[in-house]
Amino acid sequence: MATKSVLFENYEKGESNVIDKDPKTDFKDLPENVLIVKVKRTSKVKNIMGFVEKSFKEEANRHIIFSGCGDAIERTITCAEITKTKFQNLHQITKLSVLSVQEFWEPKQSDLDRLQVTREIPIVSILLCKDELNPNENGYQAPSNVKMDNKKGYKRSRISQKRKNDQGKSNSLEKKSVNEEK
């Protein structure tokens, strides 16, 4: 913490350079009409999903890339997973990379040098495709073919089955205790 206060005492933040990267560069052999959704920390999942549902229903749109960095990674993954439940049989490739941010700090005193700080922020890019992708590609995930309703139904049936089993056990214990009293 002391280094931050020394930094702010003796330096003021100057210019910043963000070396931005096109999410398409992470993936090979993509067509030109790929939908790119850049998810930000403040993006509303509901708004993103509204756009995705309208756009991805069109037959011409066969590829979509969700891209987010830093605090938006969790939201980016959420959007991709929701899309996979709404549109069945989607192939997925996930890539991780970094966004480089160069910050320059100007000295307040003439005897100090200008500082350059480079931060690297993680980025996730998720390609979802209606067509089959190369299964040998790093980060490939095949379609799961499981609907969300089926998952919920499965969980409910397992829970209700467990309750039935638990009730059966308690009834057998009651019968044993009654038999022992006789």
Image (tube, rainbow, N blue to C red):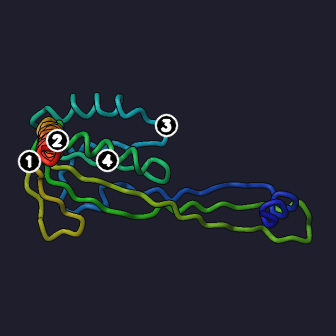
Residue that extends furthest to the front in the rendered view of this protein: 182
Label 2 – label 3 distance at C-alpha: 57 Å
Q: Find the distance from the CA under tag 1 to the CA under tag 2.
A: 45 Å
Assign the N terminus to one quadrant of the image.
bottom right
Earlier in the chain: of badge 3 and badge 1, it is 3
Q: Which mark is residue 42?
A: 3
Task: For marks 4 and 2, give the CA distance.
Answer: 57 Å
Q: Which sits earlier in the primary sequence, circle 4 or circle 2?
A: 4
Viewer can see residue 61: no
Q: Position of residue 161 (x, y in %)?
A: 12, 42
**Marks 4 and 1, how far apart at CA:** 20 Å
- Within the image, what quadrant is residue 139 found in? bottom left
Amino acid at circle 2: Glu
* Front disc: 4 or 1: 1
C-alpha span from label 3 to label 1: 31 Å
Which sits earlier in the primary sequence, circle 1 or circle 2?
1
Answer few, some or many: residues within 10 Å of disc 2's Cα (few below 14, many 20 plus, some between 14 and 19): few
Q: Which mark is residue 174?
A: 2
Q: As shown in the figure, which amino acid type bears the numbered disc 4?
A: Phe
Which amino acid, mark 3? Thr
Residue at disc 3, secondary structure: loop
Q: Earlier in the sequence, mark 3 or mark 4?
A: 3
Question: Counting other residues with Cα less than 10 Å from the Cα at mark 4, is it few (<14), some (14-19), or many (20 or more)?
Answer: many
Q: Position of residue 25 (x, y in %)?
A: 31, 60
Occupied quadrant, residue 18? bottom right
Discs 2, 3 touching: Cβ within 8 Å: no
Residue located beneath label 4 in the image: 66
Q: Residue at x 22, y 31 (%)?
A: 53
Cα distance between the residues tagged 3 and 4: 15 Å
Q: Is residue 44 visible?
A: yes
- The residue identified by callout 1 is 145
Q: Quick check: marks 3 and 4 in contact, CB under 8 Å?
A: no
